[in-house]
Amino acid sequence: MTDDALGYLKDELSALERDGLLLHPRTLEGPQGARARYDGRDVINLASNNYLGLANHPRLNAAASKAAAEFGAGSGAVRTIAGQMTEHLELERRFAAFKHSEAALMFQSGFTSNSGTVAAILAKEDVIVSDRLNHASIIDGARLSRAEIKVFDHADPDHADRLLTESAAPGRRQLLITDGVFSMDGDIAPLPDLVEVAERHGAIMMVDDAHASGVLGTGGAGTVDHFGLHGRVDVQVGTLSKAIGVIGGFIAGPAHLIEWLQNRGRPYLFSTSAPPAVTAACIAALDVLRDEPERLERLWTNTATLK
């Protein structure tokens, strides 16, 4: 071993600091909420993903505590060996119904949902047509798939159409993928137009609805519901860490997609499954979304007020 084989990272960190790019994470000293305490200061919090205020909801807290007491702190294994629990199956059933899909599969995070799925359904001879502002997890999944990557101008269906035309070849699968709501700018993808483009080319249509799930559509069902496109989007991605208020990710779609991911989705296959407290809290969150529609109404009222 050299004296400091990683010493070059000190110079890289200094460069980040000099350019004002070095991260200094704040520390939350209590529950997540609209009012919270960070680094000894009580603040109004406009920076979290906790869109509906569920991260510290009494019903979620109670469900998590009860599940931990009854089923333990962890599952102890990956799903395919010995770590699948009844709560995983119930949450997947509930999430599929929430997304109006045939089936759903839980991943450890929204990031692994995107990266694991894109990598699993395509191969190096295929092509991915991706919005320029898509999330980093989509970009990483595209790279892992080894498929050819084409990037279309943000929210430009005509450009996506041209790229699908240019990249078409016999036997070549094509994936058209977009965020539903873009996390940095907050704009909504022109999903109806993109769906028409995908259908015209026979391409797989995939939507990352991380920031739309729980926010857009009837009861927070997402952009597919918002635009009335049920049955026309092949793959829907959702997270459980934003409006749902807990942690985890989801893929919703046809049953054969879900079965394929159970066999070839590497994050699902090689990571320990979510603990009972997480799955129970997520189920409770879906109950709250159903029982307290005023939360979603208040979110949009607050949005209009701030704008």
Image (cartoon, rainbow, N blue to C red):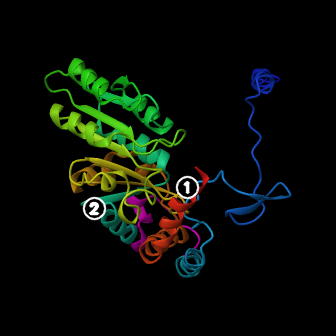
Which quadrant holds the N terminus?
top right
Would residue 193 appear left or right of 12 to someone viewing this image? Answer: left
What residue occupies the far left of the structure in this picture? 170
In terms of image quadrants, where is residue 119? top left
Could you tell me if the residues under marks 2 and 1 are in contact, i.e. CB atoms within 8 Å?
Answer: no
What residue occupies the far top of the structure in this picture? 166
Would residue 241 appear left or right of 146 to someone viewing this image? Answer: right
At a point 32% along the width and 63% down the height, the residue shown is 96
At a point 79% along the width and 20% down the height, the residue shown is 11
Coordinates of residue 112 in the picture (x, y in percent): 46, 46
* Dot 1: element: helix
At a point 75% along the width and 45% down the height, the residue shown is 25
What residue occupies the far right of the structure in this picture? 40
Badge 2 amino acid: His
Above or below, comparing residue 279 to residue 133 in the picture? below
At a point 24% along the width and 40% down the height, the residue shown is 195
* Dot 2: element: loop
Q: Is residue 134 visible?
A: yes
Report which residue position mark 1 lands on. Answer: 303
Q: What is the crowding at mark 2: few (fewer than 14 residues within 10 Å), some, or many (at least 20)?
A: some
Coordinates of residue 171 in the picture (x, y in percent): 15, 27
Would residue 113 appear left or right of 236 to someone viewing this image? Answer: right
Magenta residues (range): 72-88
Would residue 290 appear left or right of 253 to someone viewing this image? Answer: right
